[in-house]
Image (tube, helix red, strand yellow):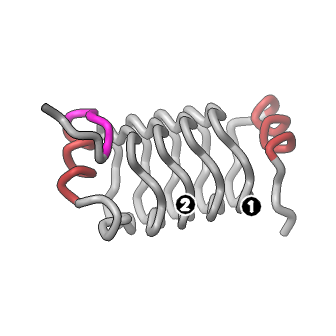
Amino acid sequence: MVTLTRKEVLEQLADTKDLRSKDMRKANLIKIDFSGCDLREANFSYANLKDASFREADLRGTSLWSANLEGADFTGANLEDADLDYSKLRGAVLFRANIRRASLPTELIPREDIMASVETGCKVGVKRF
């Protein structure tokens, strides 16, 4: 399976919202808009997805293992069965995201912080006063 580069991902997104089962490991995908995309079973392991948008995207079974998700927006995304272990989630928004059976980086970010973002839309791991 060929790993897609940033340029190839952008070219595919220009044509389709379907990136199911695509391999984007280690790709630099900062600030890319994946809103509404079908990303089921995609592999984003070690990818840099800082400030990317996944609003209303389908990420069921997707690997985000060890990915940089700082500042990413997962509002309304379906992350059921996704693997977010060891991912950097600080500053990400998970408002109304489905995280059922997802592997979460709870050794890096407290589960309560993740749940607060799902429920209120606050940023993960950012102190609230």
- Which residue sits furthest left? 129
As drawn, the label of residue 75 is none
Residue 65 visible? The answer is yes
Q: Tell me whether the residue at label 1 lies in contact with that at label 2, contact meaning CB atoms closer than 8 angstroms.
A: no
Quadrant showing the N terminus: bottom right
Which amino acid is tagged 2?
Answer: Leu
Q: Which residue is mark 2?
A: 64
Magenta extent:
120-124
106 over 91 or under it: above or below: below
Q: Is residue 45 magenta?
A: no
The residue located at (56%, 42%) in the rendering is: 50
Q: Amino acid at mark 1?
A: Asp
Dot 1 or dot 2, earlier in sequence: 1
Residue 73, image quadrant: top left
Q: Which residue is under mark 1?
A: 23
| Mark 2 surroundings within 10 Å by alpha-carbon count, few (fewer than 14), some (14 through 19), many (20 or more) | many
